[in-house]
């Protein structure tokens, strides 16, 4: 079998890995083997953290809705339950956006959710 000299292909592969790791600290951006390991770890963490970001935002929205609801004398669970009972189909992101900045609209929203007539 003939010998295969893969200098240019291997060099391009190593260059791509080192370019990916260019912002890493120390040997992680300079040495190919450690940069290769860090690339696989970074991509794995990026995959996990894309899912964690969704989880964290949901927690933030729930906290904001709960704070606005408690300011108006009702709990978060009761707010969500009443919103489905009264067919106010707003998701948590929208509810959090409405409830947080505007103190005037917040009691009206809670009233609409709890079924009171204004």
Image (cartoon, rainbow, N blue to C red):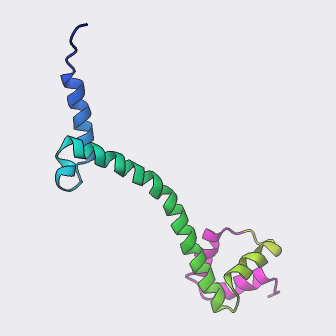
- The image quadrant of residue 11 is top left
Magenta: main secondary structure equals: helix
Q: Position of residue 32 (x, y in %)?
A: 21, 41
Q: Residue at x 76, y 81 (%)?
A: 112
| Residue 103 placement, left or right of 22 | right
Range shown magenta: 90-118
Residue at image coords 41%, 50%: 44
Does the magenta run of residues contain 37? Answer: no
- Of 26 and 112, the residue lying toward us: 26
The single residue placed furthest to the front in the displayed view is: 1
> Residue 86 in the image: x percent, y percent?
82, 75
Report the residue at 70% width, 82% height from top.
109
**Depth order, front residue of 72/22:** 22
Up-down: is 115 above or below 6?
Answer: below
- Is residue 61 visible in the rendered image? The answer is yes
- What is the x, y in percent for residue 59? 56, 72
């Amino acid at each position: 079998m003939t010998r295969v000299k893969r200098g240019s292909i291997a060099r391009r592969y190593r260059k791509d890995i080192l370019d990916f790791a260019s912002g890493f600290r120390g040997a992680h951006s300079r040495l190919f083997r450690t940069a290769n390991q860090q690339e696989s770890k970074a991509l794995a963490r990026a995959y996990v953290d894309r899912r964690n970001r969704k989880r964290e935002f949901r927690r933030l929205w729930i906290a904001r809705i709960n704070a606005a609801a408690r300011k108006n004398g009702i709990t978060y669970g009761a707010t969500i339950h009443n919103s489905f009972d009264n067919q106010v189909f707003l998701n948590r992101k929208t509810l959090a956006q409405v409830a947080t900045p505007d103190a005037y609209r917040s009691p009206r929203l809670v009233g609409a959710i709890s079924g009171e007539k204004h």
